[in-house]
Image (cartoon, helix red, strand yellow):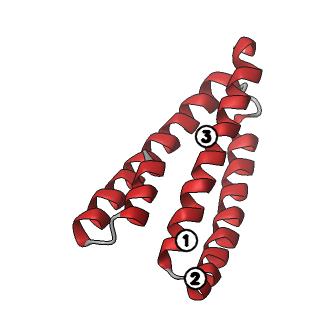
Amino acid sequence: MSIFGFVLLFVLPSFPGFVMGAGLIEFGFDVEQSATSTWMCDCIESETRSAYSSIFSTIQSVAGFIIMNLLGVLTEWNGVNAAWCVAAVAMGVDIVILVIFSRKYRNRV
């Protein structure tokens, strides 16, 4: 969902395109967040779940800070459409990584 939102922001530079794209992005992020919590409860033992949750939160915070700064510099140099394109590609890479992990650890549950 988030990828389609980023694509809409890139392709439709109008206010309705922005509203639809932003809505899809937020909905996709909400689905991803709830799926991550569900996955952690299913796949990580309760004794170590809080440590993993803390590690994931820290990684997301640091990565988010770095990525937002890099996207800001990219937007200054090339405009907003370049940032939307990079964000869509990053979401695609994220999905590929999740599929690889899912296939690798599917039988462990």
Depth check, front residue: 43 or 48: 43
Q: Which corner quadrant of the image does residue 42 belong to? A: top right
Q: Inspect this view and state whether residue 109 appears.
A: yes
Callout 2, which amino acid?
Asn
Relative depth, front residue between 1 and 42? 1
Q: Looking at numbered disc 1 in the image, what kind of residue is underneath it?
A: Ala
- Residue drawn at point x = 27 percent, y = 71 percent: 14
Tell me the CA gap for discs 2 and 3: 26 Å
Label 1 packing within 10 angstroms: few (<14), some (14-19), many (20+): many
Mark 2 or mark 3: name the one nearer the start of the chain: 2
**Sequence-first tag of 1 and 2:** 2
Q: Secondary structure at mark 2?
A: helix
Give the numbered dot on residue 95.
3
Q: Mark 1 — residue?
A: 83
Residue 46 seen in render: no
Contact between marks 2 and 3 (CB within 8 A): the answer is no
Few, some or many C-alpha atoms within 10 Å of disc 2 (few <14, some 14-19, many ≥20)?
few
Q: Are the two marked residues, 1 and 2, in contact with CB atoms closer than 8 angstroms?
A: yes
In this figure, which residue is indicated by the disc labeled 2? 78
Look at the picture and state if 90 lies above or below 71.
above
Residue at point 68% right, 44% down? 53
Measured in 3D between alpha carbons, the distance from the residue under mark 3 to the one under mark 1, in whole angstroms, is 18 Å
34 horizontally vs 57: left or right: left
